[in-house]
Image: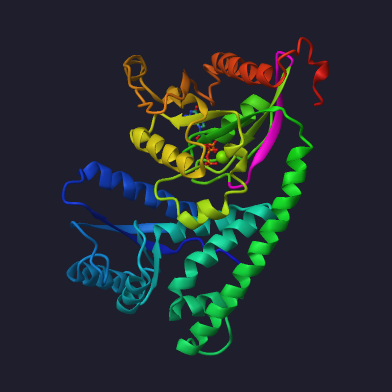
Amino acid sequence: MEAIKGKGSAAVLVGITGAHQPDHTTREYLDELRFLAKTLGVETREVFTQKVDRPNPRYFVGSGKAEEIADYVKEHAIDLVIFDDDLSPSQLRNLENLMECQIYDRSLLILEIFLERAQTSQARTQVELARYQYLMPRLTRMWTHLERQRGGTGTRGGAGEKEIETDRRNIRKQIGVLKRKLERIDRQNVTQRKSRGSMVRVALVGYTNAGKSTLMNLLTGSHILAEDRLFATVDTTVRKVVLEGIPFLLSDTVGFIRKLPHHLIESFKSTLNEVVESDVLLHVIDVSNPAYPDHVQAVNQTLTELGAGDKRTILVLNKIDRLSEDETNQNVFTVPDEHNRYVAQCPVSAIRRTGVSELRARLLQEVKRVHYTIYPNAESLDTLSV
Ligand SMILES: Nc1nc2c(ncn2[C@@H]2O[C@H](COP(=O)(O)OP(=O)(O)OP(=O)(O)O)[C@@H](O)[C@H]2O)c(=O)[nH]1
Ligand SMILES: [Mg+2]
C-alpha cells in the first residue's frame, strides 16, 4: 500500500471545541493537527473551528458550518478536509457527499504517517492491519475507488454498493492474512528476546518529537533518524549500553500522541512489548512545549492502557536549552505523580548535551538496583552472559 496523499495537497482543518474549552487549547490541538498534516507533505490552507457541546450526528459540525466549509473547498480547490476528531462512518459518508473531496480524521492521518514511516516488516504489517481495521466499517464509494487506484484490495469496475461489499470481503480476508503474519513474526521475536538473556532493560518513552531518538543516539552512539517531524520513529531499536561495567539494554520506540488510534495501540502491542517488559522507563518530555503537561498525561494514559503504568520512571526534562533562565529557575516542572513511580527528574538538553552526565549517573543507580536483584551475589560481572 502506498501512502494516500502526494506532497503538496491542500487541506483545511476542522475542530470543534466544548463551550468551556479555552481557546488556547483549541489552538494547540489544531497546531498539532497542522504539524501532522505537514509531516505527510500536506499544506494547510485554512482552519475552521466551532464551539458546540456535542458533535452534530450528520456532519460532525453544524450544517451551516459544514456548508461554509464546502463552499470554501470548492472555491479554493482543496483536496482534503481533515477533522481533529474521529468521524463515524455515516458522518464520513455525508461529508464526502457534501464536500466532494477526501475527508480525513486524525486517526487516519496518523495511520497514513505510520504507513509511510514503517521500515521493518513487523511495523508495516502492524500498521496495515490497524489501517484495514479502521477502514473496514468506513468503506465508502470514495474509499473503494481510492483503494482500487492504489492497487490495494479493491475490485475492478464501478464503485457501487456491490463493489463496496466485495471490497469489504477482500479486506476481511486481508486482515486474517496480516494477523497470521504478525503471529509468525511475534514467535520469531520471542526466540530473539530469550537469546538476550536477562539483562536489565530500559525503555525510552514519551510524546512524539520529545527527543527520544536524539537521546538514544547520545547514550548509545547509534544513528537513529531524529527529525523535527511527528513520528520520525515507528520501529523499535534496542542497543546494549555498558555503564561502569554494568550492561543493560536501551530501547527507542514509537512516540505517543493525544488520541492515538485504538487500533494502532492494539496492533503495536508486540512492538511496545519492549516497553511493557522493561525494568525502568526514561520518560522524555519536551519542556519547551507549553502543552507538555497534557503530553505527559497522554503518555501516561497510553502506558496504563499497555499495562506499563506503574514502572519506575526517570523523568527526562528535555530541550531546556530553549527555556529562558527564569523559566528554568522557576519550579515549572511539577508533574503529578499519582502512582509514586517517578524516582528522579533530570533536566537535560540532548542537543547541547547538558545534564547528560547527571542523567547517566541516575540511570546507572536504577540499573544497578535491578541488576543486583537479578544477580544478588554478583561481585564481578563474569556471571553475566552478555
Ligand atoms: N532545541 C532542542 N531540540 C532538540 C533537543 N532534543 C531533540 N531535539 C530536536 O527535536 C526534534 C525531535 O527529536 P527526535 O529525537 O526525533 O524525537 P523523538 O522523541 O524520537 O520523536 P519521534 O520519533 O517522532 O516520536 C529533532 O528536530 C531534534 O533535533 C534538545 O535538547 N533541544
Ligand atoms: Mg524517534
Question: Residue 362's quadrant in the figure?
Answer: top right
Residue at image position (53%, 78%) is 168
Looking at the rendered image, the quarter that the C terminus falls into is top right
Question: Residue 22's quadrant in the figure?
Answer: top left
Queried whether the magenta region covers residue 240, the answer comes back as: yes
For the record, the magenta segment spans 234-245
Rendering coords of residue 119 (x, y %): 66, 52
The answer to whether one can see residue 74 in this image is yes
Residue at image position (68%, 36%) is 238
Q: Is residue 349 left or right of residue 252?
A: left
Q: How many marks?
A: 0
Where 335 sits versus 178, above or below?
A: above
Q: Is residue 71 left or right of residue 384?
A: left
Query: Which one is in front, 9 or 24?
Result: 24
Looking at the rendered image, the quarter that the N terminus falls into is bottom right
Rendering coords of residue 385 (x, y %): 82, 25
Residue at image position (53%, 63%) is 131
Where 143 sits versus 257, above or below?
A: below
Question: Residue 220's quadrant in the figure?
Answer: top right
Query: Which one is in front, 311 or 284?
Result: 311
Rendering coords of residue 160 (x, y %): 46, 88
Colouring convention used in this rendered image of the protein = rainbow
Residue at far top of view: 379
Queried whether the magenta region covers residue 44, the answer comes back as: no
Query: Which one is in front, 45 or 35?
Result: 35
Where 243 sits versus 118, above or below?
A: above
The answer to whether one can see residue 152 in this image is no
Rendering coords of residue 338 (x, y %): 37, 28
Residue at image position (57%, 38%) is 276
